[in-house]
Amino acid sequence: MPILTAIILAAFGGYIAGWYLDVIEGNFALLLFLASVVTGIYWLAERFHFLPQRQAAAARLQAETVSRREELQRMGIEKVDTDTREAQQKLLMQPWWLDWTAGLFPVIVTVFLLRSFLFEPFKIPSGSMIPTLQIGDLILVNKFHYGIRLPVANTKLTAGTPVQRGDVMVFRYPPKPSVDYIKRVVGIPGDEVAYLNKKLTINDQPVASEALPDYFDESVMRYFRHERESLPGKNHEIIIDSERPGFIAGADEFPFRDQCRYSVEGVVCKVPEGHYFMMGDNRDNSLDSRYWGFVPDKNIVGKAFFVWMNFGNFKRIGSFD
């Protein structure tokens, strides 16, 4: 068992190293699931096989000690060193290969269940959602808001709350599903979304916006045009780089690209069934649906709703729209 355990732990370590070095495309949900299964098997084996064996060995040692003491007393020997407590403790101790498997099971399975069905933490790595989210924000994502899904398979079990325009959503990046992205839902199935000359229109209705004082982005040390945009029932802030053209340069080939029309003014897209059109609040510094297409429902991770920490600015802690 020690050798087998060492091989299993080495396999996990190799997978993590390969993922870190970008040699393989990692899947954290799959890694946690496999770790839960493997440590769970060890935990069951420990509870129902290995631990009873060690307890039986300790009991035998105690029984032998008592028997020896009684025999020596019959022979008239009273003072005998028969303290076996240390030996019994050693017999009851978990070996290293159980300590690193069965011992970790409660922690791993708790993290797996919390992350899969309740809340998952994320760190904001880029400025694509400025001013709503800042680089370094540590956020929580509600995993059951849009319906409970099976981990790894991502199969939907419950309906949940329908996705709404204006929601800030974490999803698996369609061109590379192992990567998580965060953007704002702008178009839901059936919508026609137009972003022309940096003005957003949904179903031929211009989205209302209100001018705000220019926004200073500390990450690039520049001022930007600052607006409050009003999607149905959702008010949020956006920034726009007036020096950038409206033309969408470098759009990829993606599923349902024929539903989009590109021009020098921008793009117009009809959102297919079961898909969503996503945009960043930092409109000219966001790689989003304008470039790589629609997000299918199966790629949804959850709804982002709370900044729980930003080590550079504690004032960032709190909920957001």
Image (spheres, rainbow, N blue to C red):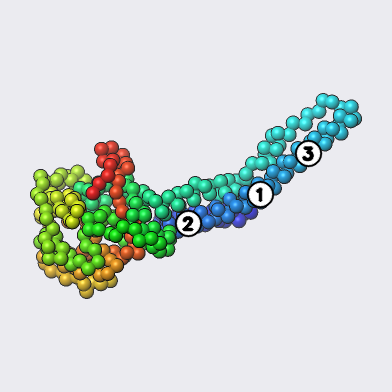
Q: Pick the residue in front: 96 or 171.
A: 171
Mark 3 lies on residue: 63
Q: CA distance from mark 3 to mark 1?
A: 20 Å
| Sequence-first disc among 1 and 2 | 2
Q: Is residue 204 left or right of residue 299?
A: left
Hey, which quadrant is residue 215 in on the image?
Answer: top left
Residue at 76% in and 40% down? 61
Callout 3 secondary element: helix
**Does residue 312 appear in the picture of this structure?**
no
**Does residue 263 appear in the picture of this structure?**
yes
Q: CA distance from mark 1 to mark 2?
A: 24 Å
Residue at 89% in and 30% down? 74
Q: Residue furthest bottom?
A: 258
Mark 1 lies on residue: 50
Vertical position of residue 42 compared to residue 275: above or below: above
**Residue 192 location (% of width, % of height):** 18, 67
Callout 1 secondary element: helix
Q: Is residue 43 left or right of residue 113?
A: right
Mark 2 lies on residue: 33
